[in-house]
Amino acid sequence: MIGGLAFGLFVAFAAAFAAVVLGRNLTRSIFAAVIALAALSGVLVTVNAGFAALCAITISALILGTLQLFGWMLVDVDRDHLPPTDRATWFARSLAFVLLGGGLLVLAVVMRGSEIFVATSAAARFVLDTGALGEQFFGVWRDLAILVGLAIPAGLLATLMLMRGEGEGR
Amino acid sequence: MSISFVLVAGGLALFWVAMLGLLWRRSLVGMLVGVLFGWLSVVVAAVGFSLARVDAAESQTGAVFVLLAALISGLQVALGLSIVIARVSRRGTLDAQDAGLLEG
């Protein structure tokens, strides 16, 4: 089972990497992202993540669909027409990614077979108690707070769509 | 090597890809794809940590955490997309390099 999980995660990683690398072509990027999402959904279903996995995959698919839709509306999906990054910035970013990747690798190596993983899991017990957190902040109104939180960006998005021509010519 | 560790390590790898998308890509839409992968990496790591805990009742609390993260992620992308739409309609470009100043 672990081999299958590792393979699924590797496919998701490779597809996600391709989605980022192919970012100059929006259609290919979204397609690779969908493959990564499918691989991840397989992984989450395999480990019986249940309702959380269903919500995660559903919302991710909706986000990808929205990005694709607005991408088609806004930009040239074949090419983003951005000038190439200058060499110094490219080098600095490469160095940053290598350092970040090295740091994450060291973290994974240290966590493997050590007490840190167990301790982190135990600490997560307190962090994950979101029901009590919502109760603390909003009391009986916590469900309403979630709906308001959804309505605010939806209203903002709709308003911006209606005001698209306002700033032109300035 | 446990299933939990494999999932958490996969989450870390996905987080690296998300950072790649956020910091490397200059297209604002490409950066939003990076945000999506960043959130998915958190979901995978959270499921891994949830599996590391033995009692089933507590793992349901982990599911609530994932739902909260899903909600916040959806809101993030909605807000980010609003900003992208506003910027593209005014400037006609997706280049994040020119977005250093947050002027309207």
Image (cartoon, rainbow, N blue to C red):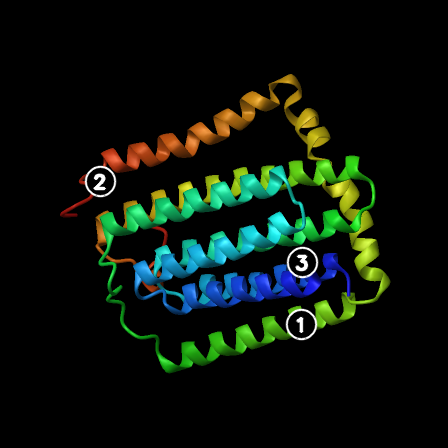
Disc 2: host chain: A
| Distance of label 1 from label 3 (alpha carbons) | 14 Å
Q: Which label is found at residue B31?
A: none
Front one among B55 and B88 = B55
SS label for mark 3? helix
Q: In the shown orientation, is residue A94 left or right of residue B45?
A: left
Q: In the shown orientation, is residue A101 left or right of residue A108?
A: left
Q: Local crowd at mark 1 within 10 Å, few (<14), some, or many (≥20)?
A: some
Q: Which residue corresponds to mark 2?
A: A164
Front one among A131 and A113 = A113
Q: From where the camera sits, is residue B100 visible? A: no
Q: Which label is found at residue A105?
A: 1
Residue plotted at (70% across, 60% down): A1
| Distance of label 2 from label 1 (alpha carbons) | 45 Å
Residue plotted at (53% across, 78% down): A95
SS label for mark 1? helix
| Distance of label 3 from label 2 (alpha carbons) | 43 Å
Type of the residue with mark 3? Leu
Rendering coords of residue B68 (x, y %):
60, 37
Q: Which residue corresponds to mark 3?
A: B7
